[in-house]
Image: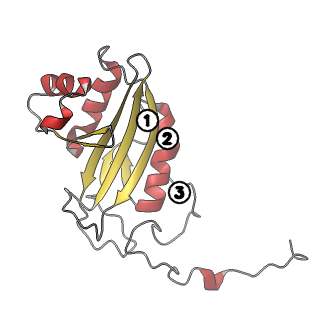
C-alpha cells in the first residue's frame, strides 16, 4: 500500500485481515481508493461490511470505467468501483477492481475475462447499479439475481459506454420509425 493512504483507518484493518493479498491504494482529493484483486473482491467486501471496526453498511454506488486511451498506465482497461460509507464511523471508501478484456471489445460477444462477483448478497441495493454497469460496459456479475439490460433494449447489439463504441452508433438509429406529434 502507498504510504500516503495509511492514514485512512480502514487500510490498516484490511491489510491485517488479508495479509496474503497485495493491495494497492490511491488517494485523490481526500478520497481513498482500495484496489482489490477481482478474485478476492467478494471476500474483502463482506469483511468491510461485517467487521465492526469497518462497518461499511451502505453501498452508495457501483460504477464502471473504461480506461481506453487513458494517458497514465492502469492495471486494466476496465474498472468497477464501489463507493462505500460507514455511518457508524463517519468514513467513506472506494473499492476498485480492474479487469482486462480477453477478446476484441468492439464486437458483441461476451468476454469471460470481464466478469466479477456480484455484491447483491451483501448489499441488495447493488442490483440495479450492477445491471447498469453490465448494460453500458458489458461487465458481467457472477451470482447476480437478475442480470439483464436495464437501460438499453434486450437485443441491443453492444455496450455504448465502451470507448471503442462509435459515437454515432452502428446503424441503430437508421432502423427507428420516425414519430411526429400526431403519431404519438
Q: Secondary structure at mark 2?
A: helix
Answer whether labels 2 and 1 touch (C-beta < 8 Å). yes
Residue 128 visible in the shown view: yes
CA–CA distance in space, label 2 to label 1: 6 Å
Q: Residue at x 49, y 41 (%)?
A: 127
Q: Earlier in the sequence, mark 2 or mark 1?
A: 1
> Hey, which residue is sitting farthest right in the picture?
182
Q: Residue at x 18, y 62 (%)?
A: 73
Which corner quadrant holds the C terminus? bottom right
- Between residues 18 and 42, which one lies in front from this camera angle? 18
Q: Which mark is residue 53?
A: none
Q: Residue at x 36, y 19 (%)?
A: 55
Image-based side of 87 in relation to 178, left or right: left
Which corner quadrant holds the N terminus? top left
| Residue on which the image places disc 1 | 120
| Residue on which the image places disc 3 | 149
CA–CA distance in space, label 2 to label 3: 12 Å
Image spot of residue 97 (x, y percent): 27, 47
Residue 147 visible in the shown view: no
| Residue on which the image places disc 2 | 127
Q: Residue at x 49, y 78 (%)?
A: 167
Amino acid at each position: 500500500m502507498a504510504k500516503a493512504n495509511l492514514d485512512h483507518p480502514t487500510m490498516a484493518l484490511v491489510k491485517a485481515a488479508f495479509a496474503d493479498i497485495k493491495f494497492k491504494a490511491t488517494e485523490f482529493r481526500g478520497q481513498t481508493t482500495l484496489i482489490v484483486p477481482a478474485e478476492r473482491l467478494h471476500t474483502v467486501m463482506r469483511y468491510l461490511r461485517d467487521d465492526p471496526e469497518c462497518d461499511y453498511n451502505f453501498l452508495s454506488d457501483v460504477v464502471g470505467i473504461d480506461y481506453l486511451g487513458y494517458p497514465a498506465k492502469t492495471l486494466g482497461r476496465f474498472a468497477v468501483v464501489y463507493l462505500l460509507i460507514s455511518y457508524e464511523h463517519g468514513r467513506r471508501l472506494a473499492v476498485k477492481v480492474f479487469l482486462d478484456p480477453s477478446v476484441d471489445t468492439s464486437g458483441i460477444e461476451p468476454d469471460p475475462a470481464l466478469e466479477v462477483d456480484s455484491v447483491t448478497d451483501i448489499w441488495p441495493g447493488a442490483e440495479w447499479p450492477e445491471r447498469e454497469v453490465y448494460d453500458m460496459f458489458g461487465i458481467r456479475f457472477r451470482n447476480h439475481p437478475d442480470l439483464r439490460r436495464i437501460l438499453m433494449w434486450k437485443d441491443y447489439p453492444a455496450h455504448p459506454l465502451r470507448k471503442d463504441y462509435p459515437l454515432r452508433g452502428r446503424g441503430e438509429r437508421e432502423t427507428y420509425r420516425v414519430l411526429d406529434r400526431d403519431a404519438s
